[in-house]
Amino acid sequence: MTKENKIVFGKLDQMRNDKILKENRIPIGFIGGGDNSFIGYTHRLAARFDNRFICVAGVFSRDQSKSKEFAQSLGIDPSRAYSNYKEMAELEKNRKDGIHAVGIMTPSGDHCDVASEFIKNNVHVICDKPLTATLDDAYRLQKLVKEKNIIFALTHNYSAYPMLREAKKHVENGKLGEIKLINVEYPQGYTVGLKKHDEKSVLKWRLDSSQVGPSMILAEIGTHAHHLLRYVTNLEISEISAEVQSLSSEISVDDNAFVLLRFLNNARGMIWVSSAATGGENGLRIRVFGTKGAIDWLQDEPNSMKYTPLDLPTQILTRGSSYLSDHSIQSSRLAAGHPEGFFEAFSNIYTEFAEAIIAKKNNNNFTYSFPTIDDGVKGIEFIFAAKNSSLQNARWIKINN
């Protein structure tokens, strides 16, 4: 990030939302995420958290009357509450005040078609994960993004927690030495005891492989774990051996995965993700062990990170403290001691997405930290390789790099 484009985070006299004039907010539309959608609410909140976007259009339901009713509750002009994404892309293209960005929260099997329709019109895209449901769609979308040179962000939001950005800086600054071991786990428990007659009401479109891809659990949270270890360590996986299965015997999709990892630098690692872990909530945790030190971060306690130098006591580093890296401090909004969490991290993705759009418009250089189309493609390659390995009795499978 160049100095002139550096985002000012965490400085209480320069809070970002106080400096953005109404006319400078980026017009954005949304596809999906209607009434009673947690992820829809999260995206819309993140978009307006720092006053960088204004929601002016959308398709919020396949039911046109519900979509229009919900759009009205958001204060959107009824003429810009569209019946489908193709209509929205076409009509917004012809408006002088049309959208410059679109947020996509549909089932992942629709992501490629929806995103492509807007990318063709040079509309920047922020999309929920995983990128797509198939490898062909992932590669097709990646090709189009490169050809049109648009900004594409993927909401692997955990990488925007300030203390995970500190973890990344610890690795980059050599505080861990050579990375040897990486462990990421993400236990949830929402399929424990789930009965066959209830699975449709709980899992919904995730039961459809054309929408979710070859593995429900890897698509839902496995890609988060995969992206996080790549983000923090800057390492790429060379081979994987996976066991993917359903531990909840009455449901028809897999809900647990163990994935062993070999990295290009000869490090070793493991990812465990599950929705069948009794009592599990959102226990995302990453531990990285090197020749000089180790780090440990848990989402239940996102404002701190454990750092253990070789042969020295463990240190507990806390968000917002002056001894942290600039990147971590700039990703914070509140002074140390005031807890931040999920919404703030998600908002960091949106705010950096806005900064990238503005920098591109002004022909300024801008280095951003949010996940991109390339990260999304890596995630889909990971899903398919893991499922392929599992179907072959955990055979080691090479991953493209």
Image: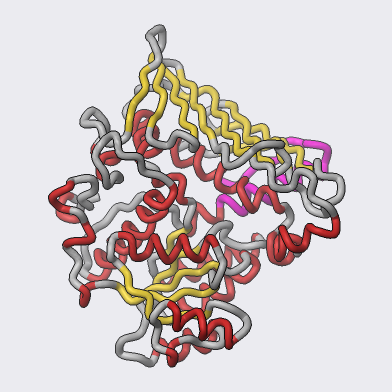
Measuring from the top left, give residue 287's x and y in whole percent.
51, 27
Residue 398 is drawn in which quadrant?
top right
Does the stretch in magenta take in 168? no
Q: Nearer the viewer, residue 392 or 54?
A: 54
Measuring from the top left, give residue 162's x and y in whole percent.
35, 40
In this image, 371 relative to 381: left or right? left
Measuring from the top left, give residue 123's x and y in whole percent.
40, 76
Does the stretch in magenta take in 400? yes
Residue 152 is drawn in which quadrant?
bottom left
In this image, 5 relative to 93: left or right? left
Residue at x 43% of width, y 92% of height:
79
In this image, 366 relative to 185: left or right? left
Residue at x 39% of width, y 43% of height:
161
Question: Is residue 123 placed above or below 233 in the rendered structure?
Answer: below
Question: Is residue 323 placed above or below 33 in the rendered structure?
Answer: above
Question: Is residue 389 placed above or below 184 in the rendered structure?
Answer: below
Measuring from the top left, give residue 117's x and y in whole percent.
51, 80
Residue 340 is drawn in which quadrant?
top left
In this image, 25 relative to 305: left or right? left
Question: Is residue 276 placed above or below 209 in the rendered structure?
Answer: above
Q: Nearer the viewer, residue 161 or 173?
A: 161
Quadrant of the image containing the C terminus:
top right
Residues rendered magenta in the picture: 378-401
Residue at x 55% of width, y 75% of height:
114
Residue at x 62% of width, y 71% of height:
110
Q: Nearer the viewer, residue 314 or 120?
A: 314
